[in-house]
Amino acid sequence: MKITKYVHSCLLVEMPEPVNRTVLFDPGIFSSIEVDKLEFLDDIVITHEHSDHCNEKLIALLVEKFPNVRIKTPSTLVPKLQGISVTTDAVGGIELLDAAHEGHGPFLKPPENIGVHYLDKLTFPGDSHSFMETKEILALPITAPWGSTDRAVQLALQLKPKHILPIHDWHWRDEVRIDMYNRLGKLFNEYDITFHKLIDGEPIVIDV
C-alpha cells in the first residue's frame, strides 16, 4: 500500500496489483495535490462537509479528469456538491465506521461525519476520536479545535493499530509538527506501534 499525504487530512492511497485501486481521502482547501499529475483515481471519500475536508472546486477538477470516479459522502453533503454525482450507498471495499464528528461546544454544530475502513486494511475516521475499532493502519487526527493530542494518543493506545498515519495537523507550524512527530514516534514505538512521520507529497509504502 502506497500512501501520500497532501497536507492536513488529505491522503492518496494506492494499492498495487492484483487490487489496482486508488482512493483519495478528504481533498480540502489545504490540500496540495496536483490533479494533472494523478494517473489513476477510483474513489474519493469525503468524511464531512467542512472546507478543510471538502473543496468543491478541487473535487470538480478531479471529476473532470476522472469522470468515472466513485465519490462516497454522508447524505448531508450531497446538496453541497451540486452537479457532481456522489453516492451514499454501499461501495465495495469501503465499510462505514460509526465515528461521530466531535463537538465544538457553542462554537459550531458538528456536521454528519462518516468514518470508513478501506479494503479491510486502513481506518480513516474523519474528525472523530469517538470510534471503537481500527484496522491495522489508522489515520489518526492528532490536533484540532475539537480534540487534543492527548486524547488522540489515548485512543490509539486503546485501539492498538500496527501503524499510525498522522492527519489533521495543518494547525501546527512546521517546527512544532516535526517536534511532535518525533515525540509521538518515540512514544508509540514503546508500544510496538509504528508512527509514520509523513512528509507532504512524499509517498511511503506499508506492506499489508
Image (tube, rainbow, N blue to C red):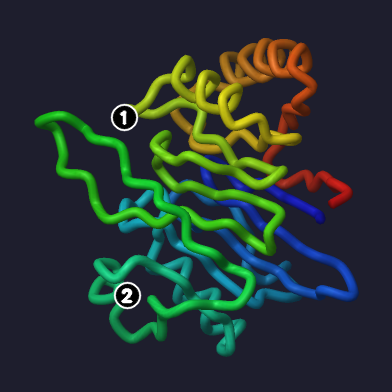
Residue at point 61%, 83% (across, down): 66
Q: Characterize the local packing of mark 1: few (<14), some (14-19) or many (20 or more) Cα atoms within 10 angstroms.
A: some
Q: Is residue 48 above or below residue 37?
A: above
Q: Characterize the local packing of mark 2: few (<14), some (14-19) or many (20 or more) Cα atoms within 10 angstroms.
A: some
Q: Nearer the viewer, residue 180 or 39?
A: 180
**Contact between labelled residues 1 and 2, with CB atoms less than 8 Å apart:** no
184 with respect to 21 (left or right): left
Q: How many marks?
A: 2
What is the x, y in percent for residue 3? 74, 51
- Secondary element at tag 2: helix
179 with respect to 131 (left or right): right
User: On the rendered image, what quadrant is the N terminus found in?
Assistant: bottom right
Tell me the mark number nearer the camera, choosing from 2 and 1: 1
What is the x, y in percent for residue 198? 71, 35
Q: Is residue 23 above or below residue 27?
A: below
Q: Is residue 78 above or below residue 163?
A: below
What is the x, y in percent for residue 102? 30, 37
The answer to which quarter of the image holds residue 70 is bottom right
122 with respect to 112 (left or right): right
Residue at point 59%, 49% (across, down): 123
The amino acid at mark 2 is Leu
What is the x, y in percent for residue 157? 60, 22
Distance between the alpha carbons at the discs numbered 2 and 1: 25 Å
- Secondary element at tag 1: loop
Residue at point 40%, 47% (across, down): 99
**In this figure, which residue is indicated by the disc labeled 2?**
81
**In this figure, which residue is indicated by the disc labeled 1?**
146
Q: Nearer the viewer, residue 2 or 121?
A: 121
The amino acid at mark 1 is Trp
Mark drawn on residue 75: none
Dot 2 or dot 1: first in sequence order is 2
Residue at point 86%, 67% (across, down): 16
